[in-house]
Image: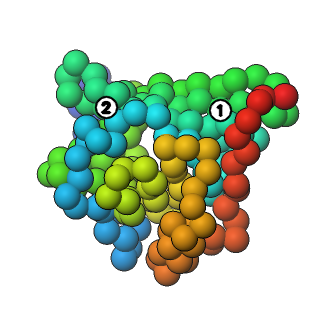
């Protein structure tokens, strides 16, 4: 007979290894922005483009708002309008630096103790436009403080993403405007 406390301890250890291992990943060849000032990054961002995945499928008018929590972590408030169901969706999570807070390598969680990579790999000096890589080549976002992005920055970010191996032809270009 297996001791319940031992089994619980083993399971908690396995969960811990997987959650820690998955949070510090960044795609091969990608480099997180440094120096990075999280306070300048806070605020509202509009999603310009993304590689689609199940939690954002069929969403337009997508935004991410970042603010500080009392414990120093970052509150993540993602919103988007599902144009199929005609409903707004929202996901609240939290993010923390993986290591040195002056490096834009974060871990983000929307599901309890499970974290995933959030890596700002390109950012203009005014903190208006960002290219964000997830933990693998399946996750990529182009963000802007406005609902559009200048073509020169868009092309620079697309070139960088392509050089890292992202399938930029599969990007979903987000529509912003009145939800219908």
- Residue at 23% across / 47% down in the picture? 37
Q: How many labels does the image show?
A: 2
> Which color scheme did the rendering employ for the protein?
rainbow
Viewed as shown, does residue 64 lie left or right of 179? left
- Residue at 73% across / 45% down in the picture? 175
Residues tagged 1 and 2 counted as in contact (Cβ below 8 A): no
- Quadrant in the rendering for residue 60: top right
Label 2 sits on residue: 74
- Quadrant in the rendering for residue 4: top left
- Residue at 41% across / 67% down in the picture? 27
Tell me residue 40's x, y (percent): 29, 42
Q: Is residue 73 visible?
A: yes
CA separation in Å, label 1 and label 2: 19 Å
Label 1 sits on residue: 80
Foreground pick, 137 / 82: 82
Say few, some or many: other residues with alpha carbon within 10 Å of mark 1 (under 14 / 14 to 19 / 20 or more). many
Q: Can residue 110 be seen in this view?
A: no
Q: From the image, which quarter does the C terminus lie in?
A: top right
Q: What element carries label 2?
A: strand
Q: From the image, which quarter does the N terminus lie in?
A: top left
């Amino acid at each position: 007979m297996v001791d319940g406390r031992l089994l619980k301890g083993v399971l908690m250890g396995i969960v811990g290894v997987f959650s820690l291992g998955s949070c510090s990943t960044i795609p091969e060849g990608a480099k997180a922005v440094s120096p990075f000032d999280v306070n300048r990054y806070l605020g509202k961002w509009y999603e310009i483009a993304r590689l689609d995945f199940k939690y954002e499928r069929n969403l337009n008018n997508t935004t991410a708002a970042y603010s500080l929590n009392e414990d120093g972590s970052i509150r993540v408030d993602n919103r988007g309008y599902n144009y199929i169901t005609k409903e707004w969706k929202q996901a609240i999570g939290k993010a923390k630096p993986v290591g040195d807070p002056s490096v834009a390598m974060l871990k983000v969680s929307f599901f309890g103790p499970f974290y995933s990579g959030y890596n700002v790999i390109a950012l203009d000096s005014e903190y208006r436009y960002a290219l964000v890589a997830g933990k693998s080549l399946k996750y990529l976002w182009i963000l802007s403080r406005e609902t559009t992005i200048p073509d020169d920055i868009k092309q620079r970010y697309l070139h960088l993403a392509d050089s890292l191996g992202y399938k930029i032809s599969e990007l979903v270009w987000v529509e912003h405007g009145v939800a219908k």
